[in-house]
Amino acid sequence: MAGDRDADPQGSEATASTDGRSARIAGWLAAARRGDDAARERLFDACRSYVDLAARYHLQRRLRAKVDASDIVQQSLLEAHRGFDRFAGESPGEWLAWLKRIVVHNAYDEAKRYRGTAKRDAGREVPLDGRGDAAEAWAFDPASSEPSPSQHAVRWEEEVRLAAALEHLPEDHRDIILLRNLERLPFEEVAKRMGRSAGACRMLWMRAIAGLREQLGESTPDA
Amino acid sequence: MRDLPHSPPQAPPEEPDLPAEILDGYLSALQKGDQAAEAELLAAHPALGPWTACLRGLDGLAAAIAGEGEAEPAAALPRVFGPYELLAELGRGGMGVVYRARHVSLGRDVAVKFLAGGVCASGEQRRRFLAEARLAARIRHPRIVSIHDAGDRDGQLWCAMDLVDGDDLAALLRDGPLPVAEAVHLVVEVARAVHHLHTSGILHRDVKSSNILLDASRTPYLTDFGLARGDDGDATMTGTVLGTPASMSPEQAAGRVREIDARSDVYGLGTVLYEALCGTPPFGGTSAIDTLLDVLEREPLPPSHYNPAVPPLLDRVCLRCLEKAPSRRPATAAALADDLESWLAEGRIVPWNDSLANRIGRLIRRYPAAGFRLLGIAGTMAIVLLRCLANPETVGFYLPVLFGLALWGALTVLWEALGTPRRGAGMAGRRLRLSPVAAGTGVAAGSWLAAALVLTDVIFVTGLLALVDGKSGPLVAVYPLLVTAAGLWLDRRLVRVVTCACLAAHLTLQIAAPGPVVWHVALIFDVLMLCTAAITDFQIGRIRLPRAATR
């Protein structure tokens, strides 16, 4: 996939498609809420990379190690599917925030399981269907600096576009952007996690950002 | 470092004059929100220009993707929330997050809880929450955590309540059970509090050890009633199962919401008593579904099994609270408290009617794997005995059959005994329970014992069929029965193992046992058996959600 895009010297096709996708999310969301299953499929498809990124971020952040997040991506999408009727918001911003809440909830559970601090399953609050999960993912945390849904709404297009572009990067590029830009770790820490020197990480990071800009169609090498 | 696979060969490295350190410095300034440093760097290194949009975008993404569940460092507190100053996080979980907070003008410390389901909650749910909070705020009881204030801010439902300095009962019990008298005292206090709620028209619905807070002197306080269920109204309408399986009453676990009443809370009190006496809840499967099925179908081991210090009478009081049918439980929480108090004072309890059928039913539900097998074996033996009585010359023929059936029954009991946690084992033996469901999700020892049990079935069935020359008669129907029965463990591997064993046994029987073989009939039978196995397998797949299956 990434290879195809690389063959495109302008890198503009990928950009156009991700842009188009995000612009259509609002339409799909509205149609899906009216019960259009095909639109719902497309909506989920378009948000998959966002969910994937959020899942990696939250799991990795909790476990402080690189882990396979595909389980919680699956689980979260499944729950979102099943709980879709419960989603009460209307804007894509609210939609993404809702998706993220489900991811955070699952990452929380998964991290607990990984660390073995889930004392006994029996003692946990276990919601038994997707609706429950979605309901339990809570919305407002006064200790977090998250913007309110309305602030969030302004940026969602950019977020989806970036998440999609990141997905097309090579693995190590994506990893380092996740650590440095999203987790905001200093390079000393990034180096420890990646098992490379800080200098090498910095170089890798710079190339990763260059690659991302290319994905986004920001840089045209000769311009 | 390896070459970048995505770099097109025709693209030279960009802006070679920009060192990575500068770019990193810019990002650090951006992340710190240091706009002066940003501007300075940008002025000093114009080459940064084209990179900034991407870095800013990523930083926005970082903020968006983080958010709830990612508490700011503790240093970021205190924060002001309405009249409260949030001092420290006390805990967080699926239901929300709780802060220690100080009412600024009153100088009083309280616990402020932010509930789940905030923005998603419908207007109706919010209205109900606030109505419930109003009701709850009227509750005044020395053993109940009072609600002082509640509200809805930007769609977030919150409430402020008494602060209890100390851990909850669940945390205390992780170190082991309480002394019997203390456990009983504690449950008496909590039961009185629950009864007070009931007389005020509130059902707690989630009485469990983690909702019982203990202060420094280990005085219990009941918390999280009524509005603990932020979206309870919804649950009431749709029968959504939400809560803690291990302490959920059967009617809640089954989603029979109309049946939930005071006696559901009595059940919850029973689980608290059980846990306080044993250090382990009555049911604890390896996944939520296993636990739920246990709650619905199984009888717990008596508390004295885990804690030999528990006397039989107390066993009975505790198990009575955990009866599946609400009508068999104490009618009110006060009745339970009275019972426990009279046991404490005089060592006696008010007797109640417990029929023999009830007791046998409980015994079988406690050991279902052996129980139901013994029922089947005993029924078969009874029929064989009647046949012998009717026709005495067949005794010689049937004696080995009877002997085989008896041996089979004895082995079944042996396996079940091996699968039951040792007496006084406390929590250690918990995961070993053999009977269906508890052993389900691949807990090694439990699975092996389950496999031993069902393979014993296959061997004895085959031997007995050979004895009675039943290879082409209707008795072979017992093989599909075994396959279906193996499905009760909800373990696909077990079903597959048993299916293979049954197929092998059936074919061996055809070849080895005397008498003509009608091969096409035998093979059709095998195909039908495979169909049975496939259906069983499919049903297990339906029940085990993807997440459960991977564990």
Image (tube, coloured by chain):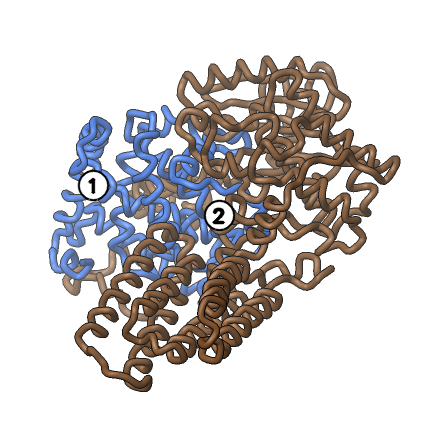
Amino acid type shown at disc 1: Glu
Foreground pick, B105 / B276 = B276
> Which residue is disc 1 drawn over?
A41
Q: Tell me residue B115's x, y (percent).
A: 53, 28
Classify 10 Å Cα crowding around label 1: few (below 14), some (14-19), many (20 and above): few
Q: Does residue B359 sit above or below B78 in this rendering?
A: below
SS of the residue at dot 2? helix
- According to the colouring, which chain is brown? B
> Which residue is disc 2 drawn over?
B293
Is any part of residue A163 visible from this angle?
yes
The residue at the point 60 percent across, 50 percent down is B360
Q: Tell me residue A212's x, y (percent).
A: 27, 51
Q: Report the residue that reaches farthest toward the right.
A: B346
Amino acid type shown at disc 2: Leu
Q: Nearer the viewer, mark 1 or mark 2?
A: 2
Q: In the rendered image, which quarter is residue B497 located in?
A: bottom left
Question: What chain letter is assigned to the residue under label 1?
Answer: A
SS of the residue at dot 1? helix
Q: Tell me residue A40's x, y (percent).
A: 21, 37
Drawn colour of chain A? blue
Q: Quadrant of the N terminus of chain B?
A: bottom left
The residue at the point 82 percent across, 33 percent down is B341
Question: What chain letter is assigned to the residue under label 2?
Answer: B
Foreground pick, B445 / B548 = B445
Is any part of residue B209 visible from this angle?
no
Q: Are marks 1 and 2 in contact (CB under 8 Å)?
A: no
Q: Quadrant of the C terminus of chain B?
A: bottom left
Q: Are marks 1 and 2 on the same chain?
A: no
Q: How many marks?
A: 2
Q: Tell me residue A221's x, y (percent).
A: 18, 54
Horizontal placement of B185 versus A24: left or right?
right
